[in-house]
Amino acid sequence: MELALRGRIAIYFDNNDKLHFVKDPLILIEENKIIDIGMYSKLKKEIAGHDIVGDKYQLLIPGLINCHTHLAMTLFRGLADDLPLDIWLKEHIWPLEENLNAKDVYRGCKLGVIESILAGVTTANSMYWYPSSEAEAMEEIGFRGLIAAPVITGITKLEDAIEIVNKHHNTAEEKIRVTLSLHSPYTVTMTDFERSYNYLVNFNKSCNEKSKLLLHTHLAESKNEMRESKQLNSKYGIEFPDVKTPTELLNNIGILDDNLIAAHCIHLNENDINLIGSKNVRVSLNPLSNAKLGNYMPPIPEMISKVRNVGIGTDGPASNNTLDLFDTVRFLALYYKGYLHEPTVIKAKEVFKLATIGGSRALNWEGIGTLEAESLADITTINLKQPHLTPKINDENILNHFAYSMKGKDVENVIINGKLIMEEGKISNLDIEKEIELVEEITHRLLQ
Ligand SMILES: [Zn+2]
């Protein structure tokens, strides 16, 4: 039986950046694709043979896209808060990670996937250790995601990362992809960046678009990053005395292009922003994590106007501290209004775009982030019959609710790749309480 989705209104951007509002909508799904979307009165003759999901209170939107996270870090949520990035990472997170095993990461990631789906996220780009465990957790639940093949100088080699690519890239009915994950310019030398990039360019030469690999890194996250990059590289005999910023550094070795997805992008000068925009670098903005770790804020208004391939992410659940993308949406929509004394900056439709079609571009994943016919059927429905989502006067009014009043808890149904993964708030075949207990046990063990 195929699916048909009903609601009060559907909202989406198409691939030409046109914003659509469809009243009394019907979405017809066959196999893993949306075959048609339109008003119920026009499409209802096609409905025979479809299971109907949804009701007149649902808002239908593309499944939300989390462009940068570390899913298994659910294990470390709330353990070391109110600290700067370097102390948080070096004195708290890295020592705990030394004792992690593959099973722990599977459990942590599984809980992260559950938390994501409950909040309407259908795709996440996760960078973590034991990527096969993350792939296993995603595949088991039917999630769409990118896992990391990590390269960190002195810890993991490109050769090992290539094995992960060969094992997992474009698997699980093409729902799982791999990124070549080079943690950052302060943990990976420029030699390792260049070697990995050369492998990737060679790999991508013979690929169609959906088989291409991306290189995933943290970029310009903290103000110390340039100094720390120089220190690391200097240990390996690599010097770059004239380079001023991490963005310039990656540009100098020729890897700043659309093969790269860069997370954070906070400490950028005007030249850096122009480089990122003109070279079509893919960007994940993670303002809530940046605020929490006291890393200052990315230049979001400039990024939105100059960078096409830009989406948003939560970052890991230990630095946000949730995987609810609605928190990030609301914070992003509000922050600059206050900071710049300018309520017209970053409008509701712009944050909606970042969380949907912008995410598709940031991850180079065609077919997600929209509800256009022929796109992949990743859809989230939101129950609008709630006090904090009242009134519903017109299209713009409902879109404003998305940016300023909606929460992950309002999500009612989630469809990924044409399959109904969550129905009326319940994820099928999952004992969530048990998954929570298992994660609690692991964290207690790691802390001992
Ligand atoms: Zn991160």
Image (tube, rainbow, N blue to C red):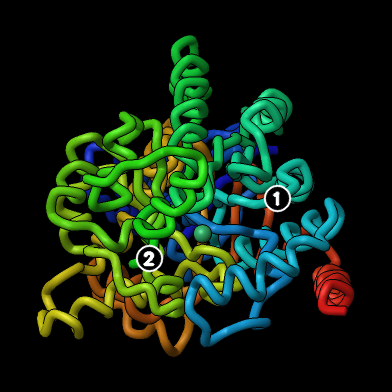
Q: Nearer the viewer, residue 40 or 272?
A: 272
Left or right: where does residue 89 sit relative to residue 228? right
Q: Nearer the viewer, residue 285 or 236?
A: 236
- Type of the residue with mark 2: Asn
Q: Residue at x 50, y 26 (%)?
A: 195
* Residue 377 screen position, x and y as percent: 53, 41
Q: Residues within 10 Å of mark 2 (few under 14, many from 20)?
A: few
Q: Quadrant of the N terminus?
A: top right
* Residue 357 screen position, x and y as percent: 35, 47
Rendered position, 290 above or below 183 = below
- Type of the residue with mark 1: Trp
For residue 446, the mark is none
Helix, strand or loop under label 2:
loop
Q: Residue at x 37, y 73 (%)?
A: 295
- Residue corresponding to mark 2: 224
Ligand 1: does it lie within 8 Å of the C-beta at label 2?
no
Q: Residue at x 76, y 41 (%)?
A: 132
Q: Nearer the viewer, residue 36 or 332?
A: 332
- Residue corresponding to mark 1: 129
Q: Is residue 305 visible?
A: yes
